[in-house]
Image (cartoon, rainbow, N blue to C red):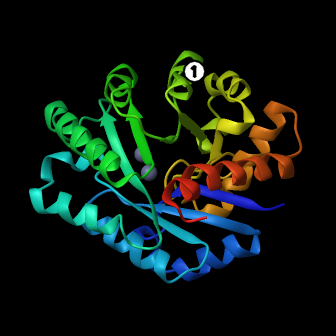
Amino acid sequence: MKIIDTHCHLHMDYYKKDREEVIKRAYNNNCIFMLTVGISLKDSEKACELAENHQIIYASAGIHPHNAKSASESDFEKIHKLCNRKKVIALGEIGLDFYRNLSPKKSQEQVFEKLLNMAIEIKIPVIIHTREAHRRTKDFIKRFPLKGVIHCFSGSKDDAKDYMDMGFYISFAGNLTYNKDLEEVAQYVPLDRLLVETDAPFLTPSPLRGKRNEPSFVKYTIMKLSSLKDIDPEYLVEKVWENVKTLFFKNRGKL
Ligand SMILES: [Zn+2]
Ligand SMILES: [Zn+2]
Protein backbone atom coordinates (compact mmCIF):
# COMPACT_ATOMS: atom_id res chain seq x y z
CA MET A 1 0.00 0.00 0.00
CA LYS A 2 1.20 3.49 -0.84
CA ILE A 3 0.96 6.19 1.82
CA ILE A 4 0.63 9.99 1.74
CA ASP A 5 1.12 12.49 4.55
CA THR A 6 -0.37 15.88 3.68
CA HIS A 7 0.62 17.61 6.93
CA CYS A 8 3.69 17.01 9.05
CA HIS A 9 6.46 19.08 10.62
CA LEU A 10 9.47 17.00 9.59
CA HIS A 11 11.86 19.94 9.50
CA MET A 12 11.40 20.67 13.23
CA ASP A 13 13.97 19.92 15.91
CA TYR A 14 11.98 16.93 17.17
CA TYR A 15 13.73 15.06 14.33
CA LYS A 16 17.16 16.64 14.74
CA LYS A 17 18.87 13.39 15.65
CA ASP A 18 17.28 10.94 13.24
CA ARG A 19 15.52 12.91 10.49
CA GLU A 20 17.06 10.92 7.62
CA GLU A 21 16.03 7.65 9.27
CA VAL A 22 12.46 8.92 9.70
CA ILE A 23 12.40 9.87 6.01
CA LYS A 24 13.83 6.48 5.08
CA ARG A 25 11.08 4.74 7.04
CA ALA A 26 8.53 6.79 5.11
CA TYR A 27 10.12 5.63 1.82
CA ASN A 28 10.18 2.02 3.07
CA ASN A 29 6.45 2.31 3.74
CA ASN A 30 5.89 3.35 0.11
CA CYS A 31 5.31 6.99 0.90
CA ILE A 32 4.85 9.00 -2.29
CA PHE A 33 4.22 12.48 -0.87
CA MET A 34 4.89 14.44 2.31
CA LEU A 35 4.05 18.06 3.00
CA THR A 36 6.11 19.64 5.76
CA VAL A 37 4.27 22.65 7.11
CA GLY A 38 5.71 25.95 8.39
CA ILE A 39 4.43 27.76 11.48
CA SER A 40 6.55 30.95 11.48
CA LEU A 41 8.96 32.66 9.11
CA LYS A 42 12.06 30.91 10.47
CA ASP A 43 10.27 27.59 10.64
CA SER A 44 8.95 27.96 7.07
CA GLU A 45 12.48 28.61 5.82
CA LYS A 46 13.55 25.31 7.38
CA ALA A 47 10.57 23.55 5.78
CA CYS A 48 11.60 24.86 2.33
CA GLU A 49 15.15 23.79 2.79
CA LEU A 50 14.17 20.24 3.73
CA ALA A 51 11.77 20.01 0.77
CA GLU A 52 14.43 21.20 -1.62
CA ASN A 53 16.66 18.34 -0.55
CA HIS A 54 14.11 15.52 -0.91
CA GLN A 55 12.16 14.70 -4.02
CA ILE A 56 8.88 13.63 -2.43
CA ILE A 57 8.84 16.27 0.31
CA TYR A 58 7.01 19.52 -0.40
CA ALA A 59 6.69 22.56 1.85
CA SER A 60 4.31 25.26 2.91
CA ALA A 61 5.03 28.67 4.42
CA GLY A 62 2.84 30.35 6.99
CA ILE A 63 2.32 31.87 10.41
CA HIS A 64 0.45 29.69 12.91
CA PRO A 65 -2.12 31.51 15.09
CA HIS A 66 0.04 30.68 18.12
CA ASN A 67 2.78 32.83 16.60
CA ALA A 68 0.55 35.69 15.46
CA LYS A 69 1.65 38.08 18.18
CA SER A 70 5.31 37.91 17.20
CA ALA A 71 4.85 38.34 13.43
CA SER A 72 6.49 41.47 12.01
CA GLU A 73 5.85 43.38 8.79
CA SER A 74 9.02 41.99 7.23
CA ASP A 75 7.92 38.45 8.13
CA PHE A 76 4.92 38.87 5.85
CA GLU A 77 7.10 40.05 2.96
CA LYS A 78 9.43 37.12 3.42
CA ILE A 79 6.59 34.60 3.66
CA HIS A 80 5.30 36.04 0.39
CA LYS A 81 8.70 35.48 -1.20
CA LEU A 82 8.95 31.94 0.16
CA CYS A 83 5.66 31.09 -1.52
CA ASN A 84 7.37 31.59 -4.87
CA ARG A 85 9.97 28.91 -4.16
CA LYS A 86 9.72 25.85 -6.35
CA LYS A 87 8.68 23.28 -3.73
CA VAL A 88 6.25 25.51 -1.82
CA ILE A 89 2.72 24.44 -2.70
CA ALA A 90 0.57 26.08 -0.01
CA LEU A 91 0.29 28.98 2.39
CA GLY A 92 -0.09 27.68 5.92
CA GLU A 93 -0.64 26.80 8.47
CA ILE A 94 -2.74 29.85 9.19
CA GLY A 95 -5.95 30.25 11.14
CA LEU A 96 -7.42 30.69 14.60
CA ASP A 97 -6.82 28.80 17.84
CA PHE A 98 -9.17 29.88 20.60
CA TYR A 99 -8.44 26.73 22.60
CA ARG A 100 -4.92 27.59 23.64
CA ASN A 101 -5.03 31.34 22.87
CA LEU A 102 -1.24 31.58 22.80
CA SER A 103 -1.67 34.87 20.91
CA PRO A 104 -4.46 37.34 21.71
CA LYS A 105 -7.59 36.78 19.60
CA LYS A 106 -7.23 40.15 17.99
CA SER A 107 -3.73 39.56 16.73
CA GLN A 108 -4.69 36.06 15.53
CA GLU A 109 -7.48 37.58 13.47
CA GLN A 110 -5.33 40.37 12.04
CA VAL A 111 -2.64 37.94 10.92
CA PHE A 112 -5.21 35.50 9.52
CA GLU A 113 -6.84 38.25 7.46
CA LYS A 114 -3.49 39.44 6.12
CA LEU A 115 -2.45 35.96 5.09
CA LEU A 116 -5.77 35.20 3.43
CA ASN A 117 -5.33 38.35 1.38
CA MET A 118 -1.83 37.24 0.52
CA ALA A 119 -3.11 33.85 -0.65
CA ILE A 120 -5.55 35.56 -2.98
CA GLU A 121 -2.78 37.72 -4.36
CA ILE A 122 -0.43 34.80 -4.96
CA LYS A 123 -3.22 32.39 -6.01
CA ILE A 124 -2.08 29.64 -3.68
CA PRO A 125 -4.13 27.12 -1.65
CA VAL A 126 -4.23 27.54 2.13
CA ILE A 127 -3.79 25.14 5.05
CA ILE A 128 -6.17 26.14 7.83
CA HIS A 129 -5.62 25.39 11.50
CA THR A 130 -8.78 26.00 13.53
CA ARG A 131 -9.49 24.98 17.11
CA GLU A 132 -12.59 25.98 19.08
CA ALA A 133 -13.05 28.67 16.44
CA HIS A 134 -15.14 27.16 13.64
CA ARG A 135 -17.73 29.92 13.50
CA ARG A 136 -15.12 32.67 13.35
CA THR A 137 -12.95 30.76 10.87
CA LYS A 138 -15.91 30.41 8.53
CA ASP A 139 -16.66 34.15 8.83
CA PHE A 140 -13.17 34.80 7.52
CA ILE A 141 -12.78 32.24 4.78
CA LYS A 142 -16.20 32.82 3.24
CA ARG A 143 -15.01 36.29 2.24
CA PHE A 144 -12.12 34.87 0.22
CA PRO A 145 -12.57 32.80 -2.94
CA LEU A 146 -9.82 30.34 -1.99
CA LYS A 147 -9.13 26.64 -2.14
CA GLY A 148 -7.58 24.86 0.78
CA VAL A 149 -7.75 22.28 3.51
CA ILE A 150 -9.05 22.27 7.07
CA HIS A 151 -6.23 20.30 8.64
CA CYS A 152 -6.60 17.90 11.57
CA PHE A 153 -10.34 18.22 11.34
CA SER A 154 -12.09 18.30 14.71
CA GLY A 155 -15.48 19.84 13.90
CA SER A 156 -18.98 18.49 13.40
CA LYS A 157 -20.65 17.14 10.28
CA ASP A 158 -22.29 20.54 9.76
CA ASP A 159 -18.92 22.28 10.00
CA ALA A 160 -17.50 19.88 7.44
CA LYS A 161 -20.40 20.60 5.12
CA ASP A 162 -19.92 24.37 5.43
CA TYR A 163 -16.21 24.12 4.66
CA MET A 164 -16.81 21.85 1.69
CA ASP A 165 -19.44 24.25 0.37
CA MET A 166 -16.75 26.91 0.45
CA GLY A 167 -14.44 24.73 -1.66
CA PHE A 168 -12.36 23.23 1.11
CA TYR A 169 -10.99 19.73 1.67
CA ILE A 170 -11.19 17.96 5.03
CA SER A 171 -8.07 16.30 6.41
CA PHE A 172 -8.09 13.66 9.13
CA ALA A 173 -5.18 13.01 11.47
CA GLY A 174 -4.30 10.35 14.06
CA ASN A 175 -7.02 11.48 16.46
CA LEU A 176 -9.49 9.74 14.14
CA THR A 177 -8.15 6.45 15.54
CA TYR A 178 -9.32 7.25 19.09
CA ASN A 179 -11.89 10.06 18.91
CA LYS A 180 -15.23 8.36 18.37
CA ASP A 181 -17.00 11.66 17.63
CA LEU A 182 -15.01 12.00 14.42
CA GLU A 183 -16.11 8.67 12.99
CA GLU A 184 -19.46 9.88 11.75
CA VAL A 185 -17.84 12.95 10.17
CA ALA A 186 -15.26 10.78 8.41
CA GLN A 187 -18.04 8.59 7.02
CA TYR A 188 -19.83 11.68 5.81
CA VAL A 189 -17.00 13.44 3.93
CA PRO A 190 -16.99 12.25 0.29
CA LEU A 191 -13.89 10.67 -1.22
CA ASP A 192 -13.24 13.61 -3.53
CA ARG A 193 -12.81 15.95 -0.54
CA LEU A 194 -10.70 13.82 1.77
CA LEU A 195 -7.08 14.16 2.81
CA VAL A 196 -5.02 12.30 5.42
CA GLU A 197 -2.16 13.53 7.57
CA THR A 198 -0.12 12.85 10.69
CA ASP A 199 0.57 16.37 12.02
CA ALA A 200 3.77 14.64 13.16
CA PRO A 201 5.43 14.87 15.65
CA PHE A 202 2.05 15.43 17.34
CA LEU A 203 -1.18 13.40 17.49
CA THR A 204 0.26 9.91 17.25
CA PRO A 205 -2.41 7.43 16.14
CA SER A 206 -3.50 4.42 18.11
CA PRO A 207 -1.87 1.86 18.71
CA LEU A 208 1.32 3.93 19.02
CA ARG A 209 0.01 6.73 21.24
CA GLY A 210 2.65 8.09 23.58
CA LYS A 211 5.41 7.75 20.98
CA ARG A 212 6.64 10.60 18.80
CA ASN A 213 4.62 10.62 15.57
CA GLU A 214 6.17 10.35 12.09
CA PRO A 215 4.89 10.20 8.49
CA SER A 216 5.04 6.39 8.18
CA PHE A 217 2.41 6.17 10.96
CA VAL A 218 -0.18 7.73 8.63
CA LYS A 219 -1.01 4.16 7.61
CA TYR A 220 -2.97 3.70 10.86
CA THR A 221 -5.19 6.65 10.00
CA ILE A 222 -5.58 5.37 6.43
CA MET A 223 -6.61 1.92 7.75
CA LYS A 224 -9.11 3.44 10.17
CA LEU A 225 -10.58 5.73 7.54
CA SER A 226 -10.93 2.97 4.97
CA SER A 227 -12.62 0.67 7.47
CA LEU A 228 -15.06 3.45 8.46
CA LYS A 229 -15.87 3.99 4.81
CA ASP A 230 -15.80 0.26 4.06
CA ILE A 231 -13.44 0.62 1.13
CA ASP A 232 -10.08 -0.78 0.15
CA PRO A 233 -7.23 1.26 1.72
CA GLU A 234 -5.33 1.27 -1.59
CA TYR A 235 -8.34 2.79 -3.29
CA LEU A 236 -8.59 5.42 -0.55
CA VAL A 237 -4.95 6.41 -1.04
CA GLU A 238 -5.51 6.63 -4.80
CA LYS A 239 -8.36 9.05 -4.17
CA VAL A 240 -6.31 11.07 -1.67
CA TRP A 241 -3.49 11.31 -4.21
CA GLU A 242 -5.91 12.65 -6.82
CA ASN A 243 -7.09 15.23 -4.28
CA VAL A 244 -3.52 16.25 -3.48
CA LYS A 245 -2.84 16.78 -7.18
CA THR A 246 -6.02 18.75 -7.71
CA LEU A 247 -5.70 20.93 -4.62
CA PHE A 248 -1.98 21.58 -4.34
CA PHE A 249 -0.45 21.05 -7.77
CA LYS A 250 -3.07 22.13 -10.28
CA ASN A 251 -3.78 25.25 -8.25
CA ARG A 252 -0.11 26.17 -8.34
CA GLY A 253 0.35 25.42 -12.02
CA LYS A 254 2.86 22.76 -10.98
CA LEU A 255 1.27 19.84 -12.76
ZN1 LIG B 1 -2.39 22.84 13.20
ZN1 LIG C 1 0.51 21.29 12.07
137 and 155: which one is in front?
137
Image point (65%, 24%), residue name? 185
Where residue 76 sits: x, y (%)?
A: 19, 57
17 relative to 102 in the view: left or right: right
Residue at image coords 40%, 40%: 129
Judge from the rendering whether residue 119 lies leftward or rightward of residue 190; answer left or right.
left
In the rendered structure, the answer to whether residue 46 lies left or right of residue 89 reads: left
Work out whether 118 lies above or below 180: below
Label 1 Cα crowd, 10 Å radius (few <14 / some 14-19 / many 20+): some
- For the residue marked with disc 1, what is the amino acid? Lys
Look at the image and tell me in which quarter the C terminus lies: bottom right
In the image shown, does 199 or 248 lie closer to the viewer?
248
Which SS class for mark 1? helix
Residue 211 can be seen in this image: no
Nearest to the observer: residue 27 or residue 247: 247
| Residue 81, picture quadrant | bottom left
- Image quarter for ligand 1 equals top left
Q: Is residue 178 above or below residue 33?
A: above
- Where is mark 1, residue-wise? 161
Q: Residue at x 66, y 79 (%)?
A: 24
Q: Position of residue 34 (x, y in %)?
A: 59, 64
Residue 113 seen by the camera: yes
Residue 117 percent location from the top left of the image: 27, 43
Q: Residue furthest left?
A: 73
Determine the residue positioned at 34% across, 55% down. Answer: 122
